[in-house]
Amino acid sequence: MVSTRQTIEISKPQHPVNDAYRAVEREEVLEVAFRDFVQMMLAAGWNEPEVALTLADIADDYVMALAVRVADK
């Protein structure tokens, strides 16, 4: 397996946690990174349905693990 590690630029938040615009900013930043990541996967030869389903599974696993960590606090 040949790896050509690429990076995705993610900017730091420009708004404090309690600023209402922070959620919009977060979504904009994540949307660009997500789109770039998906394009990299497709360029590597993966097909769109398998990428989408795998990302959904990974996101679900992450949310469930986070819920457990929060509940344990």
Image: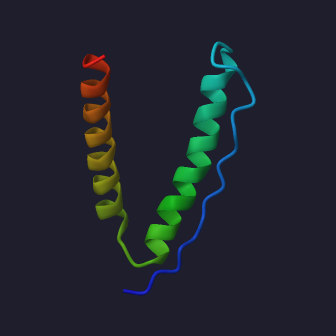
Q: Report which quarter residue 27 is drawn in.
A: top right
Q: Residue at x 29, y 56 (%)?
A: 54
Taking the image as shown, residue 31 lies to the left or right of residue 50, namely right
Q: Position of residue 73 (x, y in %)?
A: 31, 16
Q: Indicate the colouring scheme.
A: rainbow
Which quadrant, please, contains the N terminus? bottom left
Q: Position of residue 23 (x, y in %)?
A: 60, 24
Q: Check the image and name the residue furthest to the front.
A: 73
10 relative to 5, above or below: above
Q: Residue at x 69, y 33 (%)?
A: 13
Q: Report which quarter residue 17 is drawn in.
A: top right
Taking the image as shown, residue 67 lies to the left or right of residue 34, namely left
Q: In front: 23, or 12?
A: 12
Q: Residue at x 29, y 26 (%)?
A: 69
57 relative to 71, above or below: below
Q: Position of residue 24 (x, y in %)?
A: 63, 27
Taking the image as shown, residue 60 lies to the left or right of residue 34, namely left
Q: Report which quarter residue 8 is drawn in.
A: bottom right
Count how many numbered circles sit on residues in the image: 0
